[in-house]
């Protein structure tokens, strides 16, 4: 962490994390990433934002928003430092990450600093979008990386103006993914230990990824 960043954090003592994604479905990997960022960067809380109509995915390939957001609520229930926002379903489509962060910043005011929690692959895609609207200075990026990885090895792939706002958070490789969970459900395999029990029960009750969404 640079001296400039430390000075900036002291001036803006309120630090909030934002983690967006399809959450189709949310799983323990998402929760682990959020918990690590919360702890390591001393965030007051982390706001989960399910994507409504992300620019890089067509809406028909996602499970319905109401189910994905319901699963997020169930997954974070009882975790005092986590909350969910359905802000993207009230925005025009497509919803860009920068526009979402800017809108949340309006809600909280200038005394809050925002940290966008994101995977490395997603960051590389985000900084390459012509209409991403995620401008440098809007927020910091907490980039999830594998242990020993340094962002300097990819500096040539990231616009220089973004680099001062990128922080890395090392997390061992995660063995769970939403794609694998959906594959297992459709194959009749167990997803025990991959998602919270409340999320598993919801998926089974509403037959997500089988009857409703295939």
Image: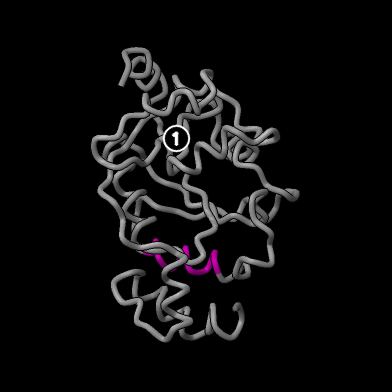
How far from the left and from the top, in percent, is residue 107?
A: 59, 38
Which of the 4 image quarters holds residue 105? top right
**Is 58 or 117 nearer to us in this picture?**
58
- 106 left or right of 207? right
Which of the 4 image quarters holds residue 68? bottom right
Most common SS among magenta residues: helix
**Is 129 or 137 nearer to us in this picture?**
129
25 w.r.t. 147: above or below: below
* Residue 75 is inside the magenta segment: yes
Image quarter hosting the N terminus: top left
The colour scheme of the drawn protein is: one colour
The span shown in magenta is: 68-77
Image quarter hosting the C terminus: bottom right
* Residue 140 is inside the magenta segment: no
The reply to whether residue 184 is visible in this rendering is yes
How far from the left and from the top, in percent, is residue 51?
A: 59, 54
Q: What residue is drawn where x is 56% and y is 40%?
A: 125
**Is 89 or 10 nearer to us in this picture?**
89
**Is 55 or 86 nearer to us in this picture?**
55
47 w.r.t. 120: above or below: below
The reply to whether residue 106 is visible in this rendering is no
How far from the left and from the top, in percent, is residue 163?
A: 46, 22
Q: What residue is drawn where x is 60% and y is 27%?
A: 135
Q: What residue is drawn where x is 25% and y is 48%?
A: 172
What residue is pinned by disc 1? 115
Q: Residues within 10 Å of mark 1 (few under 14, many from 20)?
A: many
138 w.r.t. 51: above or below: above
The mark total stands at 1
Local SS, label 1 = strand
Q: What residue is drawn where x is 60% and y is 70%?
A: 63
């Amino acid at each position: 962490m640079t001296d400039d960043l430390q000075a900036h954090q002291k001036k803006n003592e309120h630090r909030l994390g934002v983690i967006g994604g399809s959450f189709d479905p949310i799983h323990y990997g998402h929760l682990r990433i959020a918990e690590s960022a919360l702890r390591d960067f001393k965030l007051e809380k982390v706001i989960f934002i399910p994507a409504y109509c992300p620019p890089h995915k067509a809406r028909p390939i996602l499970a319905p928003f109401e189910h994905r957001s319901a699963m997020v609520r169930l997954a974070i229930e009882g975790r005092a430092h986590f909350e969910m926002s359905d802000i993207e379903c009230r925005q025009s489509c497509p919803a860009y990450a920068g526009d979402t962060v800017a809108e949340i910043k309006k809600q909280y005011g200038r005394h809050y600093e925002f940290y966008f929690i994101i995977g490395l692959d997603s960051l590389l895609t985000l900084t390459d979008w012509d209409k991403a609207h995620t401008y440098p200075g809007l927020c910091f990026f907490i980039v999830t990386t594998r242990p020993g990885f340094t962002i300097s090895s990819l500096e040539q792939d990231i616009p220089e103006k973004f680099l001062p706002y990128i922080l890395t958070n090392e997390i061992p490789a995660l063995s769970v993914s939403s794609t694998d969970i959906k594959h297992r459900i459709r194959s009749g395999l167990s997803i025990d230990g991959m998602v919270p029990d409340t999320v598993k029960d919801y998926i089974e009750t509403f037959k997500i990824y089988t009857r409703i969404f295939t």
